[in-house]
Amino acid sequence: MPRLLYINEKFGHDATIILDSGDACWISVGSRGVLVRSHKHSFWGGLLGSLLGLKLYRERDVYRALSVAQALAATFRPVPQIQCRDVILKAFCTAVWHSSSPARVKDVLNDPALLEG
């Protein structure tokens, strides 16, 4: 079962979720878009993962990121552990929560069917 490591909405909007595979996913939402990175869950991985981790998803257009977030919110059921006020961060965290590995996170977030409709 995935584990929520932290959610930060005070000094930026980001979160880290530990997946079933043991990898950590860092989700960052800001005025410059959305970035999701994967890194090994360790001291150095956590320290450098947000800078050097594998990019799983990047969207610089905030409006497109909002469209993807709306599609994710409609696709995945809510998770009680994820308590965010930011709807975009909550949608991306929920999608990551329902994924078991970084490869699955990348497939889900980059699925072109999310923007159809």
Image (cartoon, grey):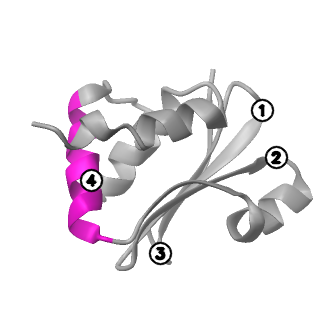
Write down the quadrant of residue 18 in the picture: top right
Residue in the picture at 21% in, 44% down: 115
Q: Is residue 111 left or right of residue 67?
A: right
Work out which quarter of the rendered image holds the C terminus and state it.
top left
Secondary-structure class at tag 4: helix
Q: Which residue is mark 1?
A: 22
Q: Position of residue 10 (x, y in %)?
A: 46, 73
- N-terminal of the pair, mark 3 or mark 2, is 3
According to the picture, the residue beneath numbered tag 4 turns out to be: 87
Looking at this view, is 8 or 61 the one in front? 61
Residue identifier under label 3:
12
Mark 3 to mark 2: distance in Å? 22 Å
The residue type indicated by label 2 comes to Lys
Image spot of residue 102 (x, y percent): 64, 37
Query: Residue 29: which quarter of the image?
Result: bottom left
Q: Is residue 57 above or below residue 91?
A: below
Residue 35 horizontal/vertical position (percent): 50, 62
Q: Is residue 82 visible?
A: no
Mark 2, residue position? 40
Residue 103 shows in this picture: yes
N-term-proximal mark, 4 vs 2: 2
Indicate left or right for 41 with 35 as reference.
Answer: right
Question: Which residue is drawn at the image coordinates 75% and 39% (left, top)?
Answer: 23
**Image spot of residue 11 (x, y percent):** 50, 78
- Judged from the image, the secondary structure of the residue bearing numbered disc 1 is loop
